[in-house]
Image (cartoon, helix red, strand yellow):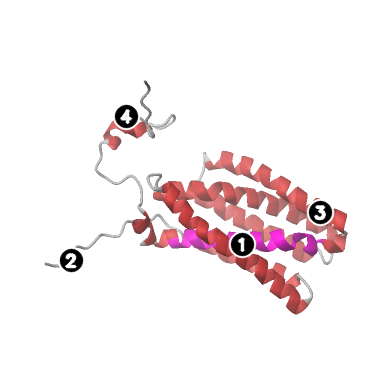
Amino acid sequence: MFALKNRPQDMGLAPDGDHGTALKGSLSTEPSGFTVKEALRSMAFHLTCLIMALFNLVLGGLTMHAIALFRSYGLEEANLMWSLTLGASVLGRVIFGYLADRGSKKFLIGVSWFMHILAFGSLMLASADARTAWGFVLFYGLAFGAFVTLLPLFVGERFGVEHFSKLIGLVGLFQIIGLAAGSILLGRIFDATASYESAVSLLAVVSILSLAVTAFIGKPRRQPVTSPAV
């Protein structure tokens, strides 16, 4: 017979690498993680959901329109560029997963947004020099891999792991909204202008906005629950 525990804290222990009075922490009466209701009362959670929606607005638009966006380079090269972008995302996951264990996850998410800005800046310069479009492949690929790796870690770090599954599921609803909105929005822009230039400029603005929003995400605080007067 084996008895399995879900967390080291259940046995008064700490995860490998953690130091301090784990037993004391395990016996503390302080809540170990935000509930869904507590998270929804936190501005930090709302802003986290917002950057998830904005990231997927960009991703949804590019997923549906990337080949058409690069079609001026030829269909074969357009497919190659998007394939290499997805390949670079694997490298982004590895690099930023490693860095996340050693630095601020919020800062690294900010870095990923800065790389978004560099990526769309590269595309905007491509009209003068087509070679700069390859900057998009590198920067967006790394940024894509970085964000999808960092955001769940950021949610767990800021809101705890006690209700992590519910919280990340709630954040995931904004992923769906962003994906749908992005694909439709870029399509509408192309239909109206017969070009993706305005769409690329919009995605650059979205990335700048997302960087600013990320900078404003502070540590969440539990709002005191007021009991009704008798």
* Residue to which mark 1 is pinned: 179
Q: Earlier in the sequence, mark 2 or mark 3?
A: 3
* Residue to which mark 2 is pinned: 228
Label annotation for residue 11: 4
Q: Amino acid at mark 2?
A: Pro
153 up-or-down from 194: above or below: above
| Left or right placement of residue 43 versus residue 195 in this view | left
Q: Amino acid at mark 3?
A: Asn
- Image spot of residue 212 (x, y percent): 54, 63
Neighbours of disc 3 within 10 Å: few (<14), some (14-19), many (20+): some
- Circle 4: element type: helix
| Left or right placement of residue 208 versus residue 45 in this view | right
- Image spot of residue 196 (x, y percent): 76, 70
Q: Residue furthest left?
A: 230
Quadrant assignment for the C terminus: bottom left
- Quick one: 166 or 80, which is closer to the camera? 166
- Image spot of residue 44 (x, y percent): 42, 59
Q: Earlier in the sequence, mark 1 or mark 3?
A: 3
Label annotation for residue 9: none
